[in-house]
Amino acid sequence: MKKETDPRFQRSREAILDAARHLLVTAGPSAVTHARIAEHAGIGRATVYRHWPTSAELLAEAMATVPMPFFDSPGIPTREWLRAELVSLGRQLDHHDVRVVAATLASTALWDDGMDARRSRFAQTLSERLAACLVDAQNRGEIVLLSDPLLAAAQIIGPIYYRSTIEHKDTDYDMIDALIASLGAWQ
Amino acid sequence: MKKETDPRFQRSREAILDAARHLLVTAGPSAVTHARIAEHAGIGRATVYRHWPTSAELLAEAMATVPMPFFDSPGIPTREWLRAELVSLGRQLDHHDVRVVAATLASTALWDDGMDARRSRFAQTLSERLAACLVDAQNRGEIVLLSDPLLAAAQIIGPIYYRSTIEHKDTDYDMIDALIASLGAWQ
């Protein structure tokens, strides 16, 4: 096997990832197979297997190339920061690629333990980040929370996610304001 | 081709649907293939093709066997009826089978036009049923709505859907009460 520092190894790795991502976004997770990637990238099937032995690993890698950096750097005041983050989340979810990654994560997690672990980490990270910001806002006297802050992710991301992935409609900004207002009594 | 009234035709049809549903629920939509169905149902692959020429049709049939009858018979008062419906929706979404159908619909709709038409009808039906009930409740003086009733589906189904399909947590009844309260000023 070639070393990871070998430039040919790196080039084939990148060609494989490009092909995997292209197939995922245009044809869905079931299209991310060693045969189709080899064909699309113009390299041998054995090379694809050498880099990623299973199709589950290939799919995971293809998904990891679509970044989902939400709620990772809290701002103050929380209300304005939250609005900007939810608007950004909604705009991201207007993109086909991001819808594909979200839907693939939700769907394949039901049968694949590795993908389920990824789903679980993703959901927990979002929910803990939001809860921490809201508790901090409450401690600063910016809001009196109405419900468990660990429910906030479902309460305010859920509607944006449903509107995008089930209704296929663009984000509604009045809805975002209403969702933020429903979290508690903003001071 | 045999007639649809032929009992053998009906038996093989039912065996195919049982196998398709079993494969969908246990192994995901990519497992719903003619070869695996033939193997699982113990019938010839040609018979499976005769009933359903494409795997997209097979998947659609397997999904249709999981009923999703939500918000279809409005009760009064709207607030109590809505609470009972959302509790029932949450309980349904606690089942693996229903999560599979919802996730498969959201996912395959991104690449398959037939599934996308099904997703669109499903989303529109839910959103129109909820809007009609809320407008009726407003006309009867039960609520003063705070936002566009066509957003209500995303606002109150979205959090339950996110909690189930992304967080894999059970329905929270306090959250359901908070969601209903957020729709407007209940009288």
Image (spheres, coloured by chain):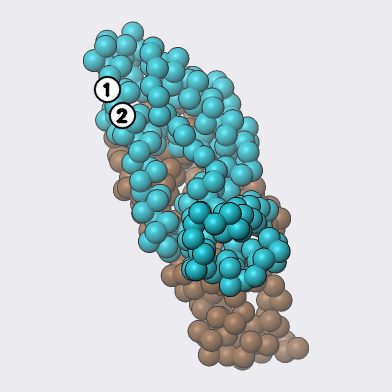
Chain colours: A cyan, B brown
Instruction: Check disc 2: other Cα within 10 Å, few if <14, some if 14-19, many if 20+.
Output: some
Whether residue B15 sits left or right of residue A154 in the image: it is right
Residue A55 location (% of width, % of height): 52, 66
Circles 1 and 2, Cβ within 8 Å, touching? The answer is yes
Q: Which residue is mark 1?
A: A135
Identity of the residue furthest to the left in this view? A139
User: Where is mark 2, residue-wise?
Assistant: A131
Q: Chain of mark 2?
A: A
Any part of residue B184 in sight:
no
- Confirm whether residue A121 shows in the render: yes
Tell me how far mark 1 sits from mark 2, CA to CA. Answer: 6 Å
- Place residue A11 in its image quadrant: bottom right
Residue at disc 1, secondary structure? helix
Location of the C terminus of chain A (image quadrant): top left
Secondary structure under the numbered disc 2 in the rendered image:
helix
* Position in image of residue A29 (x %, y %): 57, 59
The foreground one among B2 and A119 is A119
Q: Chain of mark 1?
A: A
* Residue appearing at x 44%, y 44% in the figure: B161
Q: How many labels sit on residues?
A: 2
Q: Nearer the viewer, residue B33 or A24?
A: A24
